[in-house]
Image (tube, rainbow, N blue to C red):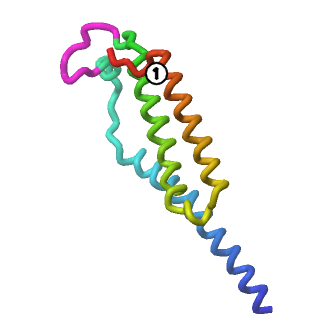
């Protein structure tokens, strides 16, 4: 009988947390609705803000895509090198199989780097 009470208490705790998880955001949103200032939106509220200066051209101008590709290349190679740290720490435990896997991984990274270099992605304008 005591095991049944423990079992029911576990579900009671989950139910309480579920109710709190639903109730707290609803109460917070309702309180925010009551406390926020009420004003009528004006057209100047929807204009583009450029450091207090009136906008002088369209905000949708074309940027050179090379900057984004360069940044993506940095992020890709930066994130991929993070995979080298756990391997280096656990190298003795992993053995020769992990060494071969890591060599394949590094070769694939080098192939990607050479490909990007040949395509001219790494040239800064």
Start-end of magenta stretch:
49-58
Left or right: 114 with respect to 55? right
Where does residue 124 sit, x and y in percent of width and height?
A: 34, 18
Q: Residue at x 31, y 18 (%)?
A: 48
Return the residue nearer the eye: 20 or 37: 20
Q: Residue pushed farthest left?
A: 52
> On the picture, is 31 further left or further right than 99?
left
**Was residue 5 drawn as part of the magenta stretch in this picture?**
no
Q: Nearer the viewer, residue 34 or 71?
A: 71
Give the residue drawn at x 50%, y 25%.
Answer: 114
Q: Is residue 31 left or right of residue 87?
A: left
- Give the image location of residue 118, x and y in percent: 49, 17
**Residue 123 found in image quarter:** top left
User: Which residue has dot 1 on it?
Assistant: 117
Q: Is 34 above or below relative to 110?
A: below
**For residue 51: magenta?**
yes
Q: With respect to residue 101, does 49 lie above or below?
A: above
Q: Main secondary structure of the magenta part?
A: loop
């Amino acid at each position: 009988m005591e095991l049944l009470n423990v079992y029911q208490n576990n579900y009671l705790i989950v139910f309480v947390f579920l109710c709190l998880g639903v109730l707290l955001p609803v109460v917070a949103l309702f309180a925010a609705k009551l406390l926020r200032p009420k004003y009528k939106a004006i057209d100047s509220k929807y204009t583009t803000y450029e450091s207090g200066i009136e906008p002088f051209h369209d905000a949708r101008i074309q940027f050179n895509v090379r900057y984004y590709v360069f940044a993506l290349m940095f992020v890709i190679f930066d994130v991929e090198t993070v995979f080298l740290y756990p391997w280096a720490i656990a190298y003795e435990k992993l053995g020769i199989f992990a060494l071969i896997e890591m060599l394949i991984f590094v070769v694939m990274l080098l192939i990607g780097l050479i490909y990007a270099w040949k395509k001219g992605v790494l040239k800064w304008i």
